[in-house]
Image: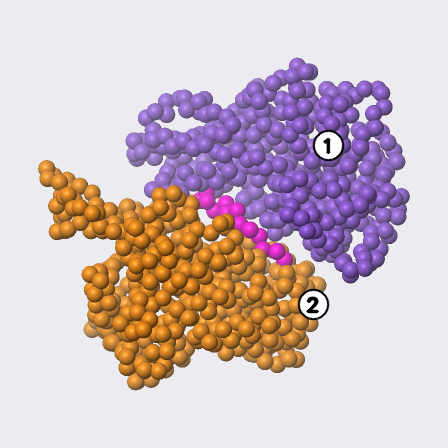
């Protein structure tokens, strides 16, 4: 499905006039349409990489803010051109910071907030508010507003169901405009914030926008791991609804591992796990930590300690219900063609050794479809029953994942994430303190 | 099997990727009744525990009794005692979504008062005017109930309001047709959800997956390879406290016209073009249009009715149907029925479908048995005298799963064959128990997904199929006599003769 544009060219209005204009927008509709009664989505949409690549002519404009293939390919080319390590994730901050802009003025159309992915527009959001920071230091805040409706693929069409509001300008200008942003968020509808950027950036804005009643969508693969896990845990502790795209991407790993132990005769083996090894791409450990934490939580392991070494290998120790020690290892690997998501899991190995019956030991190896598991297959596992599964890659775009969360979350944090995040955070903190 | 093995896979808990119901207000009429506390509220609580209910959710119980919100909550808590004790915090939160409004559906002012309450709850719980009305009332109020709702303007928005109607939908073809016409004047067909809880069972839905997600079954799923089909739904319990209803209904109306016929349609239907509610229901309706009693002109020749008599043991005696409280001592209501059908289409022409159901039978089970044709030449001696036909058995309940019976070589120097069973069990293969049918169906109704609900033409066609039998029972019951059978047996011996005429036997599971 292709992204959809607003019905009309957005109207540029002075920021102060926006709340008043929006309140009249629907009352003037002759058909009596009052707009959909669904939710409001606020999107932090920096699109730093896209801004730089479009402005440096590495990809064609306009800037739309949606994840697209040509952008990722151009970013991979930057990694090669700038001789960055091949294992650098293409959308990493280190990649776009190396892209230099020409001094010559090159006016690029910026359609952020007006180019709505159909996965999201299908849900008929009542109001989409996009905060679009610019790389230029433009102090003036630009505000645009338009009505929109999702157009069905098979034609036809429906009446307008919502509106879009775009706030565009430099970071400072956006900060100053926050009062107006807050005024245009409908009070009676659930509101979501999708922080589509690193958690390190614009902390003041992030804090202001994540009020206690707002449901948050973020990606803990973006930003400093400590910051990501602390933020996650803090919001969970406060009872705020928080959804993590990095956690969502783990679903096929969780499902595949659960599937291995679905047959009744294998379930007993879960009580005799002695070792867990997880390989991840690069140095961002959050996804690996969350998977480790989920397993530990589900199997009632008690975390004892965690250490790290100079190459970022994290080694944890857990205690099983029968006091047996379980070791977990998180190994960062340099991958030649990395995923766009930093720290994506490459493989998992789980070894179960019943004390009484060593002959019944089993070794479960899960490997990402895109990777390989030869490293995990080595190490004397031949004496065990080997169960190997390939974990399917997910080709969903970021927007599709967000739409999935918007349509499937009932406005609270997943209990599995709520239980796993504190363990993941503790693992990381212990590794730092040792 | 080792009993100490965990029932649920701990890694499986919470992993379901289910559709989440949109903001919703569910109104149950007949909230003081048995179904509400035995099935509906437990199913909703299960949905709540599975985090499938939205935070913007309200359940309004309606009945004539003058209960308060608090009293309704307490009664439901008491009814769900075991579940509540295990999940006290969750129940306390769920109970906050429960409300009660005393309503007599026949009184206009009561329905208007309910409308005001719904608007108030819309504001309070942000349910966006999405409303599902569940008619768990006496069947005689289905039509007037829909009319009252429509008159109050509560069914006016086809995208936001829908009505769920319990079985039985009519007593025969004519009454079902009249009821359809009446409810269709109150709401559009896509707002009407006729519920058959059998369709909510995982194993019934699995018939579709087994047939249409595998390439090995569909090529042999026809008259060229299958010689007969048996569909059985057997209960060990008697009429219990439902004598009042059962006396006016009987096994044919209570079980065959709906549950067993739905299993028949799923077994016999053609593959739909795509997995779409209308495509599936079109194919099911086509099966019913092609189905007929094996002998429509002399229907007594293809049907056996029975009634349980006393039985059991000295220590555990069981009374007969006519001695049950609320049952007439001369009752001719059938508690057992077995019949033979044909589906006259290219796929099934000439293949008999045997259907039986009964109370106080030897075992509690529901299953579909597809018996394959015999091998054309018997090359080997069989341990049992002659080789048994291959059978595919779909176990609907209990011990949900499937098994396939086929011949293998018996160990030894000769070449003797004997049958063995290859088995799939839901409990052993999946790390979590299946949901009750109502969990799935209530969720689907609130999602507005009609796939597992019966369309008007299906209901009418199902009644039409059994009309010759119903007319016979009404007009000349002596032609379809009631045979007594001992409690906890497999029904009257006449039902065995129904198959014996075709050189077949009922499967004894």
Q: Crowding near pointer 1: few (<14 within 10 Å), some, many (20+)?
A: many
The answer to which of B389 and B18 lies nearer the viewer is: B389
Residue B224 is situated, as x and y percent measured from the top left of the image, at 30, 50
Q: Chain B takes which shade in the image?
A: orange
Q: Chain A takes which shade in the image?
A: purple
Subunit bearing disc 2: B
Task: Report, in whole angstroms, how far the alpha carbon at label 2 lies from the one at label 1.
Answer: 43 Å
Q: Is residue A408 left or right of residue B176?
A: right
Q: Is residue A78 left or right of residue A23?
A: left
Residue A246 is situated, as x and y percent measured from the top left of the image, at 60, 36
Residue for point 66% across, 80% down: B109
What is the secondary structure assignment of the residue under circle 2? helix
Reading the image, the residue beneath label 2 is B120
Where is B351 relative to A347, above or below? Answer: below
Q: Do the residues marked 2 and 1 share a common chain?
A: no
Q: Nearer the viewer, mark 2 or mark 1?
A: 1
Q: How many marks?
A: 2
Residue for point 24% across, 61% down: B506
């Amino acid at each position: 499905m292709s992204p959809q544009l607003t019905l009309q060219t957005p109207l540029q209005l002075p920021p102060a006039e926006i709340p008043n204009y929006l309140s009249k927008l629907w009352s003037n509709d002759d058909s009596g349409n009052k707009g959909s009664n669904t939710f409001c989505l606020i999107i932090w949409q920096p699109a730093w990489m896209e801004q730089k690549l479009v402005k440096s002519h590495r990809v064609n404009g306009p800037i739309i803010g949606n994840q697209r293939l040509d952008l990722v390919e151009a970013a991979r080319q930057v990694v090669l051109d700038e001789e960055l390590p091949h294992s650098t994730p293409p959308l990493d901050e280190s990649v776009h910071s190396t892209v230099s802009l020409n001094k010559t003025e090159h006016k690029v159309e910026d359609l952020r907030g007006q180019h709505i992915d159909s996965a999201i527009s299908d849900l008929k959001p009542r109001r989409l508010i996009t905060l679009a920071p610019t790389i230029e230091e433009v102090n003036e805040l630009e505000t645009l507003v338009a009505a929109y409706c999702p157009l069905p693929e098979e034609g036809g069409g429906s009446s307008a169901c919502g509106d879009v509001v775009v706030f565009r300008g430099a970071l400072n200008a956006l900060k100053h405009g926050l009062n107006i942003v807050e005024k245009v968020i409908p009070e009676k509808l659930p509101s979501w914030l999708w922080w589509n950027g690193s958690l390190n950036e614009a902390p003041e804005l992030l804090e202001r926008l994540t009020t206690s009643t707002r449901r948050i969508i973020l990606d803990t693969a973006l930003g400093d791991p400590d910051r990501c896990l602390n933020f996650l845990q803090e919001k969970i502790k406060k009872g705020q609804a928080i959804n993590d795209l990095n956690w969502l991407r783990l679903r096929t790993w969780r499902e595949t591992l659960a599937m291995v132990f679905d047959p009744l005769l294998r379930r007993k083996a879960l009580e005799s796990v002695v070792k867990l090894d997880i390989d991840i791409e690069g140095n961002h450990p959050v996804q690996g930590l969350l998977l480790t934490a989920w397993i530990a939580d589900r199997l009632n392991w008690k975390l004892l300690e965690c250490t790290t070494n100079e190459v970022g290998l994290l080694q944890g120790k857990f205690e099983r219900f029968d006091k047996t020690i379980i070791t977990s290892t998180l190994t960062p690997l340099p991958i030649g063609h990395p995923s766009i998501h930093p720290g994506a899991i490459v493989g998992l190995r789980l070894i179960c050794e019943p004390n009484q019956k060593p002959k019944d030991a089993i070794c479960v190896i899960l490997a990402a479809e895109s990777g390989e598991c030869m490293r995990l297959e080595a190490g004397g596992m031949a004496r065990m029953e080997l169960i190997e599964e390939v974990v399917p890659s997910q080709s969903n775009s970021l927007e599709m994942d967000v739409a999935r969360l918007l349509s499937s979350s009932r406005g609270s944090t997943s209990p599995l994430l709520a239980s796993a995040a504190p363990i993941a955070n503790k693992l990381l903190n212990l590794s730092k303190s040792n | 099997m080792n009993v100490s093995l965990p029932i649920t896979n701990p890694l499986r808990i919470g992993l379901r990727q289910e559709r989440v119901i949109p903001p919703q207000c569910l109104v149950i009429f007949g909230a003081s009744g048995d179904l509400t506390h035995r099935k509906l509220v437990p199913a909703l609580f299960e949905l709540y525990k599975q985090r499938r209910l939205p935070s913007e959710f309200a359940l309004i119980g309606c009945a004539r009794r003058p209960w308060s919100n608090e009293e309704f909550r307490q009664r439901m808590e008491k009814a769900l005692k075991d579940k509540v004790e295990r999940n006290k915090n969750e129940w306390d939160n769920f109970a906050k979504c429960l409300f009660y409004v005393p309503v007599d559906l026949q009184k206009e002012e009561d329905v208007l008062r309910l409308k005001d309450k719904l608007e108030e709850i819309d504001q309070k719980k942000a349910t966006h005017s999405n409303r599902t009305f569940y008619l768990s009332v006496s069947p005689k109020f289905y039509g007037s109930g829909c009319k009252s709702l429509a008159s109050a303007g509560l069914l006016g928005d086809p995208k936001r309001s829908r009505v769920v109607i319990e079985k039985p939908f009519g007593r025969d073809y004519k009454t079902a047709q009249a009821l359809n016409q009446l409810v269709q004047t109150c709401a559009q067909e896509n707002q009407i959800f006729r519920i058959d809880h059998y369709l909510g069972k995982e194993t019934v839905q699995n018939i579709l997956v087994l047939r249409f997600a595998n390439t090995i079954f569909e090529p042999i799923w026809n008259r060229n390879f299958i010689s007969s089909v048996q569909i059985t739904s057997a209960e060990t319990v008697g009429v219990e406290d439902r004598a009042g209803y059962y006396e006016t209904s009987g096994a044919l109306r209570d079980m065959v016209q709906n549950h067993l016929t739905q299993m028949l349609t799923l077994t016999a239907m053609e593959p739909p073009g795509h997995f779409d509610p209308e495509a599936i229901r079109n194919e099911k309706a086509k099966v019913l249009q092609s189905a007929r009693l094996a002998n429509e002109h002399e229907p007594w020749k293809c049907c056996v009715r029975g009634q349980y008599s006393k039985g059991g043991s000295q220590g555990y005696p069981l009374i007969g149907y006519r001695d049950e409280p609320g049952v007439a001592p001369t009752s001719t209501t059938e508690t057992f029925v077995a019949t033979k059908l044909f589906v006259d289409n290219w796929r099934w022409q000439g293949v008999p479908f045997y259907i039986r159901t009964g109370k106080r039978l030897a075992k509690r089970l529901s299953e579909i048995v597809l018996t394959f044709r015999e091998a054309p030449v018997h090359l080997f001696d069989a341990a049992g005298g002659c080789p048994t036909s291959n059978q595919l058995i779909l176990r609907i309940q209990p011990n949900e799963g499937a098994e396939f019976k086929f011949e293998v070589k018996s160990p030894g120097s000769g070449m003797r064959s004997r049958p063995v069973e290859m088995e799939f069990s839901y409990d052993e293969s999946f790390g979590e128990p299946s949901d009750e049918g109502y969990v799935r169906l209530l969720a689907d109704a609130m999602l507005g997904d009609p796939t597992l609900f019966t369309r008007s033409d299906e209901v009418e066609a199902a009644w039409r199929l059994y009309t010759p039998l119903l007319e016979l029972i009404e007009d000349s019951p002596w032609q379809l006599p009631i045979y007594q059978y001992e409690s906890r047996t497999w029904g009257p011996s006449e039902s065995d003769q129904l198959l014996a005429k075709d050189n077949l036997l009922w499967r004894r599971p």
